[in-house]
Image (cartoon, helix red, strand yellow):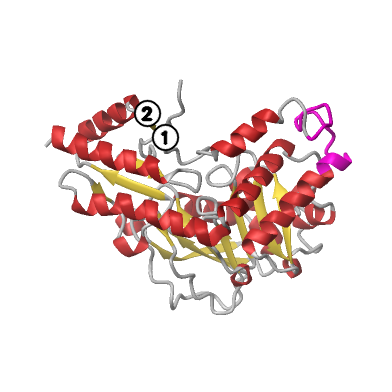
Amino acid sequence: MSRVYNFSAGPAVLPEEVLKQAAAEMLDYNGSGMSINEMSHRSKTFDKVIETAEQDIRDLMNIPDNYKVLFLQGGASQQFAAVPMNLMQNKKAAYIVTGQWAKKALAEAKKYGDAIEVASSADKTFSYIPDCSDLAIPEDADYVYICENNTIYGTKFKKLPNTKGHILVSDVSSCFLSEPVNVNDYGVIYGGVQKNVGPAGLVISIIREDLIRDDVPDFVPTMLKWKTQADNGSLYNTPNCWAIYMCGLVFKWLKEQGGLSEMQKRNEEKAALLYNFLDNSKLFKGTVRAEDRSLMNVPFVTGSDELDAKFVAEATANGLVSLKGHRTVGGMRASIYNAMPKEGVQKLVDFMESFEKANS
């Protein structure tokens, strides 16, 4: 069977070249006579894998020397707890709630201190980004938290909030490495890699060194102390070696493609194709305020649950898979991450056009 165009929100499409290289190296990585999945994480061979991966993401994101890069397990959801555990010195934090993941992060933070919601777009089903230019952030807040790209609802912060001097923590899971960022704007920037960077089971946290403290509360598990991981180069225990290796291959691929500026250009072109069609369609409608649209996740509906289901079924039969919207919102969603080629988006638009004609 030939490969399909996979619009899944995560685990998601990976570059075909990367998958082929991983397949070729599955039984014998770099002349070692064994797979990455079989070798010790303490070996010199794996040392080189993780060190190279770290250097390559540093190069791609232009990460300053005073930031640590940690390859951690537990996904982004585990960082919902790790963030307040490591940062809540004053036991206070401000959360901007623009979707389900920020909502879950806020609920988790409330277990460890006074986490408050300072802005939300829940009133319109998270279909926009609220004005964050002058928020009522408590002066003694330890940090301000955002989920920068909302996978389910298809919104993206185009401008970072005014944190009024407070540390900004951002979950970038679904826009990770899709465009250049200024790492200095953040105290902590982290993302689960299974959406736009690699296979499931890994979160990459980029943390300013002064925020990696030893004086965290006694109840914080050793494994969730950022200092434990930083002091041990992400090798305190056996890490997700396979996911780190795969991310390393993706980092190399991104460099070969021309880096993050080139990816942004491609992602803008792909998104424009789909949004232009939606804006002119009589059947399909996008669900997000135009100025807040994500380049990565594009939700849309027909207005009929029955027609939505028919569209998803027929699209799947045509090799356009995983277009069903998240169970909490329904409709459709096309996730068009870095590894989705432009021709995949064009095929989707062509199919939508023919579906519209057949069902008008």
- SS label for mark 2: loop
User: Label 1 neighbourhood size at 10 Å, few (<14), some (14-19), many (20+)?
Assistant: many
Q: How many marks?
A: 2
In the picture, the disc for residue 5 is 1
Compare residues 146 and 62 and report the one nearer the observer.
62
Q: Is residue 243 above or below residue 134?
A: above
Q: Could you tell me the amino acid type at mark 1? A: Tyr
Is 92 left, or right, of 135 in this rendering? right
Compare residues 117 and 181 and report the one nearer the observer.
181
Q: Residue at x 41, y 47 (%)?
A: 152
In the rendered image, the quadrant that contains the C terminus is top left
> How far from the left and from the top, in percent, is residue 298?
36, 48
> How far from the left and from the top, in percent, is residue 237?
81, 41
Identify the image quadrant of residue 185.
Answer: bottom right
User: Label 2 neighbourhood size at 10 Å, few (<14), some (14-19), many (20+)?
Assistant: some
Residue 40 on the magenta segment: yes
